[in-house]
């Protein structure tokens, strides 16, 4: 169809609009020329939780299954992640050889401590998160290689591994059991110190556990103390530092007061490696730094040496 030619005379005058020059733009209208912001939403696919863990040391992503198989040790930089009490027990003792002592003993709020949350509420919260754990330590008898030992393992995930009345009582009973049965004692420590919610009762555990260890030592039974990250305050000032043999995991934080407190008290600048296992080994407090993957085999060797005289007699 041919295009229809419209003549100027055929147009209605009212329909023809004169050209108008637009007015100059003021500051309020310049936003039209502003570059739009890009959406903050990432186009990358989200990584599902529980599959990968980022190493805080080398910042590499580690597949969780690989990390678990490696006892929570980074396969790239050997960073030692915190290990739960039951996982550590399984990594040390022979299969089906561990017999737990006092599994139902749990803390109660004797002092009715109140703060942002009550002590009882905190205990219930942690027990719901970790139903297989009644308090911050698991004690029992097990076999490491050919040796029958009394083993206590603390768990930092339960209230920071703090030592309250139940932790002290369970460890004291473990020590007394080791003395009665004539077996070596091994305690794996991981703690932030005494439990503030129990006041003086928690501090009394320092003397009670050390008293039991003195009787154990008089019978010439060995006690091996293993320090993991972190081992501090009241635990380090009591049973953790009086072992016949003191071992530690690499780069573990070990000390009594915190770094800032020590700097403020001494008014001096501390070295970068202060309160690490390597720092304390240079100064004679620690006998050996043992990687987690070698701990079981090294313990068997130490127990062979420490119990040789008693076996021969």
Image (cartoon, helix red, strand yellow):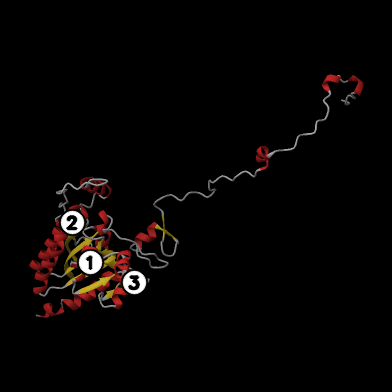
In the rendered image, which residue does mark 3 sit on? 268
Disc ID at residue 18: none
- Name above or below for residue 90 compared with residue 27: below
- Name above or below for residue 285 compared with residue 127: below
The disc, 2 or 1, on the residue closer to the chain's N-terminal end is 2
Residue at 87% across, 21% down: 11
User: Between marks 1 and 3, how big is the CA–CA gap?
Assistant: 23 Å
- Name above or below for residue 104 compared with residue 17: below
> Which image quarter holds the C terminus?
bottom left
Q: Is residue 68 visible?
A: yes
User: Between marks 2 and 3, how big is the CA–CA gap?
Assistant: 33 Å
Could you tell me residue 137's position as x and y percent?
21, 58
In the rendered image, which residue does mark 1 sit on? 236
Residues at marks 2 and 3 touching, judged by CB atoms closer than 8 Å: no
Within 10 Å of disc 3 (Cα), the crowding (few <14, some 14-19, many 20+) is few
Q: Residue 175 appears in which quarter of the rendering?
A: bottom left
* Secondary structure state at the residue bearing disc 3: loop
The disc, 1 or 3, on the residue closer to the chain's N-terminal end is 1
Could you tell me residue 90's position as x and y percent?
25, 61
* Secondary structure state at the residue bearing disc 2: loop
Q: Nearer the viewer, mark 2 or mark 3?
A: 3
Residue at 33% across, 64% down: 260
Residue at 82% across, 21% down: 15
Residues at marks 2 and 1 touching, judged by CB atoms closer than 8 Å: no
User: Between marks 2 and 1, how big is the CA–CA gap?
Assistant: 14 Å
> Which image quarter holds the N terminus?
top right
In the rendered image, which residue does mark 2 sit on? 164
Within 10 Å of disc 2 (Cα), the crowding (few <14, some 14-19, many 20+) is many
Q: Residue furthest front?
A: 267
> Quick check: 284 left or right of 221?
right
């Amino acid at each position: 169809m041919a295009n229809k030619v419209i003549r100027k005379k055929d147009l209605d005058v009212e329909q023809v609009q004169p050209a108008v020059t637009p007015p100059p733009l003021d500051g309020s209208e310049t936003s039209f020329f502003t570059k739009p912001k890009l959406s903050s939403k990432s186009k990358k696919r989200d990584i599902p939780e529980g599959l990968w863990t980022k190493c805080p040391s080398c910042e590499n992503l580690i597949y969780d299954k690989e990390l678990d198989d490696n006892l929570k040790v980074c396969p790239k930089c050997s960073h030692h992640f915190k290990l739960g009490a039951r996982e550590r027990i399984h990594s040390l003792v022979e299969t089906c050889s561990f017999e737990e002592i006092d599994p139902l003993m749990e803390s109660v709020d004797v002092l009715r401590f109140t703060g942002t949350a009550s002590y009882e509420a905190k205990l219930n919260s942690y027990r719901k998160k970790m139903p297989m754990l009644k308090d911050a330590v698991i004690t029992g008898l097990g076999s490491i290689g050919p040796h029958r030992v009394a083993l206590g393992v603390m768990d930092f995930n339960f209230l920071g591994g703090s030592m309250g009345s139940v932790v002290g009582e369970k460890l004291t009973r473990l020590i007394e059991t080791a003395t009665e049965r004539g077996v070596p004692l091994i305690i794996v420590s991981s703690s932030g110190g005494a439990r503030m919610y129990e006041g003086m009762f928690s501090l009394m555990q320092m003397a009670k556990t050390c008293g039991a260890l003195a009787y154990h030592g008089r019978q010439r039974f060995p006690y091996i103390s293993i320090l993991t990250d972190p081992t501090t305050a009241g635990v380090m000032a009591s049973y953790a530092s009086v072992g016949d043999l003191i071992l530690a995991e690499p780069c573990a934080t070990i000390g009594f007061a915190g770094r800032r407190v020590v700097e403020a008290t001494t008014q001096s600048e501390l070295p970068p490696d202060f309160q690490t296992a390597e720092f304390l080994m240079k100064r004679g407090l620690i006998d050996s730094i043992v990687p987690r993957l070698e701990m079981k085999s090294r313990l068997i060797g130490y127990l062979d040496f420490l119990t040789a005289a008693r076996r021969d007699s």
